[in-house]
Every structure is written in structure tokens, then in C-alpha cells.
Amino acid sequence: MSYSIGLAGGIGSGKSTVAALFKECGVTVIDSDAISHQLTQPGGDAIAAICAAFGDKYIDASGALDRQKMRQLVFSDPAAKQRLEGILHPLIRAQMLAQAKAASTSPYMLMVVPLLFEAGYHELVQRTLVVDCAEATQVARAMQRSGLAEQEIRDIMAQQILRAERLRRADDIIQNDGDLQSLRQQVERSHQRYLALSAGSD
């Protein structure tokens, strides 16, 4: 498997934008959220297990996971959250490793995992990169993007690792409080560093 960087950040921090900029540099990007969506769409590998564990009321008319209902459940019931993660995380991890193995031509790869530290995915990578911004910026961006209310966004943030702890555990940090040009420059600097590190690991 190629040299791997784990990319994390709180909701609304700009992980997707940063990942897209790395992709422009020719880096293979493996996105755990995209994999999770595939697993929970109609016919997805996680649907039968979710239905067995939670009942068919959490599956919508199309046969996909009813995300809104499940979100309400896991925020009010920690045991349900653990049960859902117990179904999804092994499947996500297996898919990420399979994609990583297939992407051996990339000089290094970026694994985008919001729960990089919380769910132990940092063990799969050689280095960790955190996208960070002010919490007020996170909330505003997440509300604009998702249409969720401020309290719902803050509830999601409360389920994630504390910002200070995420920053403490990061090997590298990209600040995303500025404009796109500043972000692009930071990504380019990080890209050059990772090229050098991956070359040295051969």
C-alpha cells in the first residue's frame, strides 16, 4: 500500500474542499463518507444488517437508510450509535483498504475520515492532517451546506472529538479561515512535503 495521509476535521471545516485540491495535484483520495453512502444506499452491503439491528422503519421507501431518523436515534441513544458504528466501520475500513490496494500507482494517498481519531482509522495511515477553522465558521458553513439548524450542527460537533484534542493529535494542520487562494497554497506546500516523505519511505 502507498504512503497514506489521514485527513480529518470537524463538520464544516472544509475537508471536502481540501481533498478536492489534493485531487487536483494528482493524489488518490479515498473518502469514508462516500463509502458510507454506498453501503447505505438501496442494495448497499450494510442495509440488511441495519434492518436486522434497528428494524425496517429506519429504511426509507427506496430501500436506503433513512438518515434523518437514524441521526435522531443515535444522538439520543449512545448504545444505538455504538451498534450502528459496529455495523458500518468494519465495512468502511475494508472498502478503504481495498481501494488503497488498488491505487498503488499514486505517490501517496489521502484517506478522508471525519472520525479519524475517534474510530481508530489513524492506525491505517503514516501521517495525520487536520483541517481547522473557528467553531463559528464551522457552524455557519455546515448550516449553509446541509440546511440543518444550528442546534443540530452543534449536536453533531458534540459527538466529535474536541477541537483542541484533534489539533493536539494532528501531525499537520491546514487553517481554513481564509480564502481559497490561501487554502490552495497550504495544500500545495503539504503536497510537496508528502511527496518527499513518500519518496523517502520507499
Image (spheres, rainbow, N blue to C red):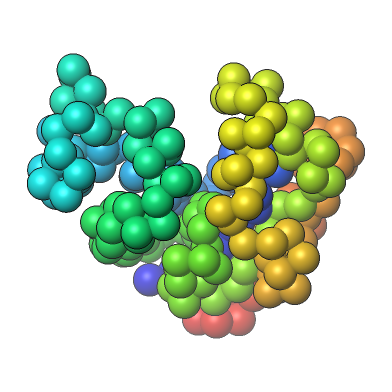
| Quarter of the figure with residue 196 | bottom right
Report the residue that reaches farthest toward the bottom.
201
* Residue 180 location (% of width, % of height): 81, 33
Give the residue displayed 38% in from the left and 41% down from the top: 73
Q: What residue lies at 16% left-to-right and 50% top-to-bottom?
A: 53
| Residue drawn where x is 70% and y is 43% of the image | 13
Q: Is residue 22 above or below residue 178?
A: below
| Residue 8 or residue 108, whichever sits in front | 8
Residue 84 in the image, given as x and y percentages of width and height: 30, 52
Q: Tell whether 175 sits left or right of 99.
A: right
> Is any part of residue 4 visible from this angle?
no
In the shown orientation, is residue 151 left or right of residue 60? right
Quadrant the N terminus occupies = bottom left
- Of 88 and 98, nearer the camera is 88
Quarter occupied by residue 54 = top left
Is residue 77 visible from the viewing direction of this image? Answer: yes
In front: 164, or 75?
Answer: 75
- The answer to whether residue 189 is left or right of residue 10 is right
Q: Quadrant of residue 99?
A: bottom left
